[in-house]
Amino acid sequence: MLSKRVIPCLDVRNGKLTKGIKFAGNVDIGDPVESARKYYEEGADEIVFYDITASAEARGIFLDVVEKVAANIFIPFSVGGGISSVQDMRDVLLAGAEKISINSAAVKNPSLITEGAEAFGSQAIVIGMDVLHVGASPEIPSGYEIVIHGGRKRMGLDALEWARTCERLGAGELCINSIDADGTQDGYELTLTKAIVDAVSIPVIASGGAGKPEHMYDAVTKGGASAALIASIVHYGEYTIRECKEYMAGRGAPMRMVW
């Protein structure tokens, strides 16, 4: 069985590490370069970097910050925010990332997924999905709707339908962020996670809501996710990456234990 991954997420605004709750009320909490280095040294399997206002502000990503993070870590590094073309993807990869995460741009232009996969390989294309629970309806049969621009714009698009479309178009991985659970530390949205895991055959990352290692264990067992994305619990020093992985391994989840 493949090892489950623990992936700290660095939300970056104006070059600073930031965190909010349910995509709102963000406050700056530190330096993304220092945090990335710390999490790498603690045993993180990957690092995810999101420039959270790039799409909404219609600008490119801060490549200088990407370069600084890449120079300080030696594990896979995924970058998202404001990426809307193959050239943007190339710029991010040349800045040191191994993977590109696209979200809003992919919803607005699905062909971008295929273009990126053909240019750089499916393994480099991660689709970020920001999902809001809205209740089942004829338009949204799963009850989960795709939202873009950092939670600002609902799209009338069913999350399960979009997940299947992304896989068909060439995505190599999906990162499922529950807006309802984001930053609450009450646990991942396991119903959503499991539904998407069952709908596709590519790896799925659970995101939004981790408050303790037990939540991460549930995401990769009950939810079936390949990885657990975390933020608040490590940003605020409640747990270290190592403590999270040791807990999960202790309960039988296959983990990469390298310090």
Image (cartoon, rainbow, N blue to C red):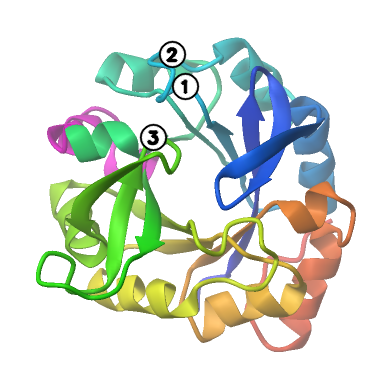
What residue is rendered at 55% in x and 22% in y?
96
Q: Nearer the viewer, residue 86 or 208?
A: 208
How would you rate the neighbour count of disc 2 (Cα within 10 Å): few for under 14, some for 14-19, many for 20 or more? some
Q: Tell me if residue 138 comes above or below residue 29 in the rendering.
A: below
Q: Residue 149 carries which label?
A: 3
Tell me the CA gap for discs 1 and 3: 9 Å
Query: For the residues marked 1 and 2, what is the alpha-carbon distance in whole angstroms?
Result: 6 Å
Range of magenta residues: 109-126
Callout 2 secondary element: loop
- Residue 57 on image: x %, y %: 44, 17
Question: Which dot, 1 or 2, sits closer to the camera?
Answer: 1
Q: Can residue 75 be seen in this view?
A: no
Which one is in front, 38 or 71?
38
What is the spatial separation of the Cα atoms under label 2 and label 3, in whole angstroms? Answer: 14 Å
The numbered mark, 1 or 2, whose residue comes first in the sequence reads 1
Residue type at the position of mark 3: His
Q: Is residue 185 visible?
A: yes
Q: Nearer the viewer, mark 2 or mark 3?
A: 3
Identify residue type, mark 1.
Ala
Crowding near pointer 1: few (<14 within 10 Å), some, many (20+)? many
